[in-house]
Amino acid sequence: MGRYFMNTFIITVPSVLGALFLSSLGAFALAWYDFRLSKTILMIFVGGMLIPFQMLLIPVYRMSISFGIYDSYIGVILFHIAFQLGFCTFFLRNFMKTIPASIFDAAMIDGAGHFLIYRRIVLPLVVPAMAALGILEFTWIWNDYLWSLILIQSDRFKPVTLGLVNLQGQWITSWNVMAAGSIIAAVVPLVVFLLFQRYFIEGLTVGSVKG
């Protein structure tokens, strides 16, 4: 179980950080840059959220084998980032739209570049939203079973969700051990939520009251 927990952390933490970083860049571009395909790209992100995961199991499985990332940490991490990117970008883009445009205009007048505006102005303002989104993403990826089952075969790479299944044999099942392991696995997302619940609530309620 210790190996399984370590694998889950190795998969979950980079997946959450990668999804938040890439989606924040995409949301910044879609929220504040007016280019020809901006609405089309946004609709692609939203449309990707509507595709059932079950339709993608075989294509993802074959793609991971052809790219040589099957049965590895990097394969699961990349696919987690890819499939969470649409929701995260849509969420952060709507939040960034509430930031007054005068802030960006003043920064541009002062000579700030685009990435400097993103790093020094946008990121500090969207910390509550990213914290709320990070908690949701951490919980979803930590509890993921489907993609790990499809993309991981070796026992040394399995996360805790797959590890608990190994406790169930063909002729005998250690229900007491499975129950204990399930409780321990559920404690981690609960602790993360309790530690960051202030940011989570702030991120969900920001903008609900206008001054």
Image: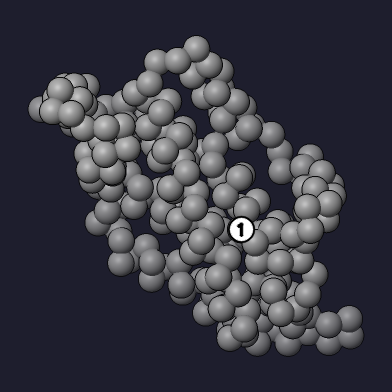
Q: Position of residue 204 (x, y in %)?
A: 32, 42
The answer to which image quadrant residue 108 occupies is top left
Image spot of residue 26 (x, y percent):
45, 34
Quarter assignment of residue 71: bottom right
Q: Quadrant of the C terminus?
A: top left
Q: Residue furthest left?
A: 211
Above or below: residue 87 compared with residue 175 = above
Left of 100 or right of it: where is 42?
right
Residue in the picture at 46% in, 72% down = 188
Within-10-Å neighbours for mark 1: few <14, some 14–19, many 20+: many
Instruction: Determine whether, in the image, residue 96 is placed left or right of residue 40.
Output: left
Residue most extreme to the front: 111
Is 142 rendered above or below residue 56?
Answer: below
Q: Which amino acid, mark 1?
A: Ile
Question: Is residue 142 toward the left or the right of residue 209 in the image?
Answer: right
Q: Residue at x 38, y 21 (%)?
A: 33
